[in-house]
Image (cartoon, rainbow, N blue to C red):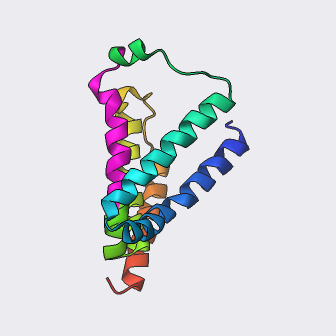
Amino acid sequence: MVNLKLFVWALVAGSFIPLVGVLNGRAGRVLGDPLFACVLVFIVGLVLAIAVTAFTGRGMPEFQNFGQLKGIEYFAGFVVGFYVLSATVLAGKIGVANFIVMAVSGQIIFSLLIDHFGLFGAPIRPVNLLQLGGASMLLGGLVITQLANGK
């Protein structure tokens, strides 16, 4: 069984996701362009990552090890960048809730595919009917929220 603290950590991390679009939108207006807000986010994120790494006593990676990474392993940075840019631009245009509803829908569908087929080297965890039912209920709830908004 996974430690409950890890689930709470994940819940808190996920609860902050809607703030990305809102706070970046505000920063983008002040800075004159939403893309500048994304640059700010990654500078702050880099500083945080370095500080946490230093605080936990992990030191810094050996820079020659970066050359051993495959291109797909660098893709995670692209994905995060794409998400932050998307949240920054789209939350102001379609609303925070609509953006998150669509982002969560994509996460549910793609995470089931990753688990089931072991994509990108993830461990294979075959999806069963109960999981599909739960995911369908989540997606159904997402659709209902959109219908309630008259979309």
Q: Residue at x 68, y 29 (%)?
A: 56
Residue at point 38% right, 75% down?
95
Measuring from the top left, give residue 54's x and y in whole percent. Answer: 63, 29
**x, y percentage for residue 24?**
43, 63
Say whether residue 23 is left or right of residue 99: right
Assign the N terminus to one quadrant of the image: top right
Question: In the rendered view of the protein, which quadrant contains the C terminus?
Answer: bottom left
Image point (50%, 48%), residue name: 44
**Bounds of the magenta segment:** 68-86
Image coordinates for residue 61, horizontal then vertical, percent: 50, 19
Asked if the magenta segment contains residue 96, the reply would be no
**Residue 34, image quadrant:** bottom left
Determine whether 135 is above or below 96 in the image: above
Q: Residue furthest bottom?
A: 150
Q: Residue furthest left?
A: 71
Residue 102 visible in this rendered orientation of the protein = no
**Taken as a whole, is the magenta stretch helix, strand or loop?**
helix
Seen at 47% across and 14% down, the residue is: 62
The answer to whether residue 103 is visible is: yes
